Amino acid sequence: MSEYDFDVIIVGAGPAGSTAAHDLAKSGAKVLLLDKEKFPRYKACGGGIPIRTEKMLPFPIDSVIEDSVHLLRVSALGKHSFTRDCGEPFAHMVLRNRFDNLLLEQAQITGAEFRPKTTIQDLKLTKNGVVITAEHFTASSKFLICADGAHSPVGKLAGLGTTLAECAAWEVEIQAKYQDIYPKTSGATALIDIGFQPWGYAWMFPKAEVLSIGIVTPRSQAPKMKKRIQNYLEHLHIADYPIDIAKGHKIRFRRNAEQIAKKRIALIGDAAGLADEFTQEGISYAIHSGKLVAKSLISGENTDPLKNYENAVDQYIQPELNAARLISFMFQGMLHRFQKPWMFATGHAPFLWKSFFEVQRGNSTYDKELKKAGPLGFVANQMLQRNSKYE
Ligand SMILES: Cc1cc2nc3c(=O)[nH]c(=O)nc-3n(C[C@H](O)[C@H](O)[C@H](O)COP(=O)(O)OP(=O)(O)OC[C@H]3O[C@@H](n4cnc5c(N)ncnc54)[C@H](O)[C@@H]3O)c2cc1C
């Protein structure tokens, strides 16, 4: 009998935790996956799953796809709107309760044990492992993975992730079908409304029976979010529909190579600030980091596997996050200085949204697309480093 109850305990059964649990259990590790909620559970999210995210998963997600969008309609504070067509879907639309439950089921099929309604309240490092405590429950393991989302209470207990940057987001859901409201559109469309200072956007993402409308802005502008959502609902002519769900949540960003792992404990997904700053999307990085931490643990228990995991994030994920932040800074800079001509130019010149679609479909990366800007990217980076106000 091992001196530990489990090889690995994972706190949080979102996309990051369930992916790590899936890959670890598949390799034969004894894995406990815990969540404070009973599943399926709601998570404030637009539920936009770029095709590149789907490509990372080893099982089909068709059963939870509500719609697949190939059209993107862009406006700037309701004006200068245009529609770009990817020609094929660039993202699937899902409801997070169903999507996350599918990932959890797949982790359980590979052998991970799941314990719902278990809120971790304390953790202790032992000589070679970790002991976690919830109400009426204690368990030990060699390694602890914190996949406990943007608030990351367990990461905080471990002293990790406390200096990550963050922004605010708000989502409302209404029962309505996109085609009923906009019968003239030629296909499934994602809507975004940009133009908030210094950055931020509102979205409308269609699901089979539901519309997800939301907004993401710097944290300092959180008090304005509800009013802005109301304006956006009015602009979309859906302000009269009853709102089923309205919920806010923060999103965190790793900007400065912050420490996300210690000898026995690692942060993954939103807990580690792995969301990009161009779209504020985080599910693909949650899944990617879940895979990287599992791979590091499987391949190197005798080295320093969680240091290897942090290095892998620095090598494979961080360049994307840095590039996305810089692209966002450049895009917003042009938008605010030259709103009308910039909207006209990006609406007509094919390259910008084509690049975006290529990244969304997994055929390119933000890092590769940024390199195409040549010295412009270098100059913008110097400006970004000097601009402490770009939250
Ligand atoms: C409004 C909004 C819209 C978004 N839209 C999109 C989008 O369209 N596309 C996209 O890719 N990303 C989007 N994101 C980001 C995306 O939601 C996250 O990046 C993603 O959920 C991260 O997954 P995760 O597994 O790291 O964390 P989460 O999905 O947050 O899962 C964390 C889990 O940990 C559990 N937990 C927390 N504390 C404890 C505890 N003490 N004990 C036990 N369990 C605990 C929680 O119950 C939860 O189930 C959006 C975010 C917001 C806020």
Image (cartoon, rainbow, N blue to C red):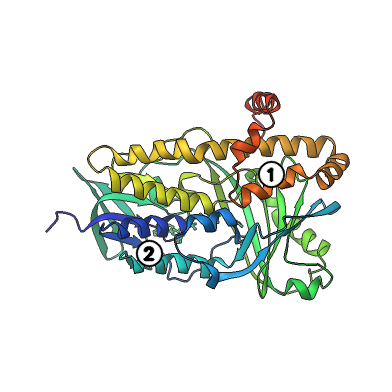
**Residue 141 spot, x, y in % from top left:** 24, 53
What whole-number distance in Å separates the C-alpha atoms at marks 2 and 1? 34 Å
Q: Which mark sits nearer the N-terminus, 2 or 1?
A: 2
Residue 6 picture quarter: bottom left
Visible residue check, residue 389:
yes
The label number, if any, that marks residue 355 in the structure image = 1
Which of 119/286 is in front?
Answer: 286
Report the residue at 42% width, 71% height from top. 38
Left or right: where 131 falls relative to 221 = left
Report the residue at 61% width, 37% height from top. 368
**As displayed, is residue 380 above or below residue 124?**
above
**Residue 380 spot, x, y in % from top left:** 69, 27
Report the residue at 75% width, 67% height from top. 187
**As displayed, is residue 125 above or below residue 94?**
above
Judged from this view, the residue extending furthest toward the left is: 1
The label number, if any, that marks residue 281 in the structure image = none
Badge 1: residue crowd in 10 Å (few <14, some 14–19, many ≥20): some
**Residue 275 spot, x, y in % from top left:** 55, 46
The label number, if any, that marks residue 107 in the structure image = 2
Which of 375/41 is in front?
Answer: 375
Secondary element at image label 2 = helix
- Image quadrant holding the N terminus, namely bottom left
Left or right: where 141 falls relative to 74 = left
Residue type at numbered disc 1: Ser
Residue type at numbered disc 2: Ala
**Residue 45 spot, x, y in % from top left:** 59, 60
Badge 2: residue crowd in 10 Å (few <14, some 14–19, many ≥20): many
